[in-house]
Image (cartoon, grey):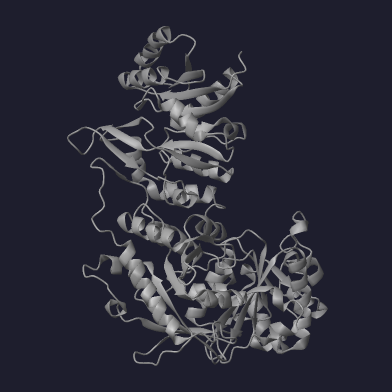
């Protein structure tokens, strides 16, 4: 056998011998720079014509065309059989093209796919635009659809953007990525590509690939639509890690940044989802072209959820207070309509509140423009010549213990409005975009990424997600005001904080409060500067609302809005630790459903009333708690006496050394 790298083509066959003959002929007449093999996998077809057609064609293409009879396993099994056959036939095969029996390719297609696949081992497959023939919707008899002009893993999680008629790098098959043979009712292609993503590969689009897809009134795809809900449920469960909240936010940061910060005084735009990670930087003129292209094709192109107009000095000040940034952008992400004049102040709270009409404007202001508002401005048939032509902005006040932006002039805000006017003027197309009559985008609408994928998975009900886009171990400590007022409590928490940080993990804080919010305590502990995020959580002003559990009264500390907040915050952690009887304990079960490890830390230092109501609360929520941590022998004894499983009870030393916390102890318990 020659050592020259070769290619392969797999064609599953079951019925429709005339269609099969067209597919085989198109596969065997390729103008290719490399040798290649074609195998037809007869998937137990009950019609003898299938085998006869292939036998006749083998006489025409001897040595190139191969025939494999295979028990009927439906499409996934037949493809796998063909792949395995080619791998055993020629060890030098470097890529395999998958062609269904009722489709066909042009003579230049195989070489085009191989050229696009290239030599980058990270590119696992090359996929085509789809040119339909057969039943089409125009008189000319052809119709071409683009599913993803630029590949995106995030878009692929919304729907299948890679047709089966694609070329796959052989290394993926050798690593065990094959079709799921249990998926005999459809969507097997989508599941296969998700397996490729799971293995670390991405796709690359092949434009003008010469791939032709035969559309028939009734097909396997049409049947799979009737089972869509159950098939998608199976796919998401099988590829759970791809649909995990943290992973989705990481992909959003890379593929579809949620924010764009426009620093007009420097002519730069920074795009990101997670404000603590490196952004994508481009010039203002490049971003203006991006706006124009997006406006002409909003379905096909990603665009930030919102734009911030500010000065480079204001952006520097925001970045100087990273502890508040994820919380700040979380607040802005919930703003979907209108323009927002965002002002900053210092106070005994950490809130984001609208201000009544007519409230005087503060000097330290920036401009926030949701993409829906930008679209409305571009849609406006009237010319926008100046600030007076813009809609009146809503006023939003961001209050934090340490003011985020200060000592900037009121005139800066007027400049930002003028920059928005200029962006709209320059990005608005002078004429409607021209589109090819029979070529159009047919992939998932980019708005579906956030509406149908990210928001429902990464946030609680009507909430919006927090952008946290890295894979580092992340531990969330939830506590109330009484805990941080006790020096002994802070010293005790330092042991866990130090363990997390020394292992290279990230530490975030949920701080529950009733009236005043004070984060100055973080400046009093050695590990405070390394806390990446601080999230305020409003408690009820009284404990009158309660539930009964086994004859014991259990107060409900969190209002509905705070429950939604902590659920959304908690999904972005690997582990959440509720200190004492913090209200966050009430939501641990909901958070745990997203794969987050949950723990409650019970020490007399944390709460004087530990042996009363809070102890009953631990027992009520015990089913939702993975670990109960305590160094107090009496607490441990009482937990055991109440029937808490011994495996859930551990000391702080054991917990801090567990794989839940320690990155370098992943195999420990």
Q: Nearer the viewer, residue 223 or 164?
A: 164
Q: Nearer the viewer, residue 277 or 75?
A: 277
Q: Which of the 4 quarters of the picture holds residue 390?
A: bottom left
Relative placement, left or right, of 229 versus 481 is left
Position in image of residue 504 (x %, y %): 73, 63
Position in image of residue 173 (x %, y %): 57, 32
Against 18, is 222 above or below?
below
The answer to whether one can see residue 551 in this image is no
Position in image of residue 69 (x %, y %): 47, 17
Quadrant placement of the C terminus: bottom right
Q: Which of the 4 quarters of the picture holds residue 498?
A: bottom right
In percent of the image, x 37 and y 44: which residue is there? 147
Q: Nearer the viewer, residue 568 or 118?
A: 118
In percent of the image, x 47 and y 40: which residue is there? 204
Q: Nearer the viewer, residue 218 or 279?
A: 279
Residue sitting at the far top: 59
Position in image of residue 107 (x %, y %): 38, 22
Q: Which of the 4 quarters of the picture holds residue 86?
A: top right
């Amino acid at each position: 056998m020659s050592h020259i790298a070769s290619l392969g083509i797999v064609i599953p066959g079951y019925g429709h011998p005339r269609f099969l003959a067209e597919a085989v002929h198109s596969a065997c007449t390729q103008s290719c720079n490399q040798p290649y093999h074609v195998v037809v996998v007869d998937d137990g077809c009950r019609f003898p014509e299938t085998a006869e057609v292939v036998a006749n064609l083998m006489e025409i293409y001897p040595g190139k065309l191969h025939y494999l009879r295979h028990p009927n396993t439906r499409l996934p099994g037949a493809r796998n059989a063909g792949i395995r056959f080619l791998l055993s036939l020629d060890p030098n095969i470097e890529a395999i093209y998958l062609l269904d029996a009722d489709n066909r390719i042009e003579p230049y297609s195989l070489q085009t796919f191989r050229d696009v696949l290239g030599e980058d081992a990270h590119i696992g497959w090359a996929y085509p635009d789809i040119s339909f023939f057969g039943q089409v919707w125009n008189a000319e008899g052809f119709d071409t659809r683009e599913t993803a002009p630029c590949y995106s893993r995030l878009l692929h999680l919304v729907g299948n953007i890679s047709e089966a008629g694609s070329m796959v790098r052989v290394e993926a098959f050798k690593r065990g990525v094959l079709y799921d043979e249990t998926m005999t009712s459809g969507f097997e292609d989508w599941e296969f590509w998700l397996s490729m993503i799971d293995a670390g590969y991405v796709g690359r689009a092949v434009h003008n690939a010469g791939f032709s897809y035969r559309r028939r009134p009734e097909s396997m795809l049409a049947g799979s639509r009737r089972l869509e809900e159950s098939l998608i449920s199976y796919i998401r469960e099988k590829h759970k890690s791809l649909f995990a909240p943290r992973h989705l936010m990481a992909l959003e940061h890379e593929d579809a940044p949620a924010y764009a910060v426009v620093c007009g005084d420097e002519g730069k735009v920074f795009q990101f989802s997670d404000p603590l990670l490196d952004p994508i930087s481009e010039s203002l003129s490049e971003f203006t072209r991006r706006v124009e292209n997006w406006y002409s094709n909003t379905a096909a192109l990603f665009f930030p959820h919102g734009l911030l107009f500010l000065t480079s000095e204001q952006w520097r000040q925001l970045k100087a207070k990273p502890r508040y940034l994820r919380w700040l952008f979380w607040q802005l992400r919930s703003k979907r309509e209108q323009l927002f004049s965002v002002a900053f102040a210092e106070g005994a709270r950490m809130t984001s509140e609208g201000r009544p009409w007519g409230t005087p404007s503060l000097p330290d202001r920036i401009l926030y423009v949701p993409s829906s508002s930008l679209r409305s401005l571009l849609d406006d048939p009237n010319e926008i010549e100046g600030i007076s032509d813009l809609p009146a902005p809503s006023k939003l006040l961001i209050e934090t213990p340490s003011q985020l932006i200060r000592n900037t002039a009121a005139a800066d805000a007027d400049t930002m409005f003028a920059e928005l006017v200029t962006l709209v003027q320059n990005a608005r197309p002078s004429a409607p975009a021209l589109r090819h009559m029979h070529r159009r985008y047919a992939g998932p609408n980019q708005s579906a990424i956030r509406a149908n994928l990210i928001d429902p998975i990464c946030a609680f009900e009507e909430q919006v997600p927090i952008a946290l886009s890295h894979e580092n171990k992340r531990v969330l400590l939830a506590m109330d005001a009484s805990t941080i007022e006790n020096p002994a409590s802070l010293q005790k928490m330092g042991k866990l904080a130090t363990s997390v940080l020394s292992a290279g993990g990230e530490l975030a804080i949920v701080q529950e409060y009733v009236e005043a919010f004070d984060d100055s305590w973080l400046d009093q502990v050695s590990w405070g500067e390394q806390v990446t995020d601080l999230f305020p959580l409003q408690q009820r002003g009284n404990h009158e609302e309660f539930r009964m559990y086994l004859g014991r009264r259990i107060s409900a500390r969190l209002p509905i809005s705070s429950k939604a907040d902590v659920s959304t915050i908690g999904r972005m952690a690997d582990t959440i630790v509720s200190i004492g009887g913090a209200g966050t304990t009430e939501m641990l079960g909901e958070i745990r459903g997203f794969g987050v490890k949950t723990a409650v830390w019970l020490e007399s230092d944390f709460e004087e009333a530990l042996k009363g109501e809070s102890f009953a609360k631990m027992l009520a929520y015990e089913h939702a708690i993975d670990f109960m941590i305590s160094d107090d022998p009496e607490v441990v004894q009482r937990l055991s006496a109440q029937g808490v499983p011994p495996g859930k009870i551990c000391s702080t030393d054991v917990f801090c050394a567990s794989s839940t916390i320690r990155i370098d102890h992943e195999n420990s318990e």
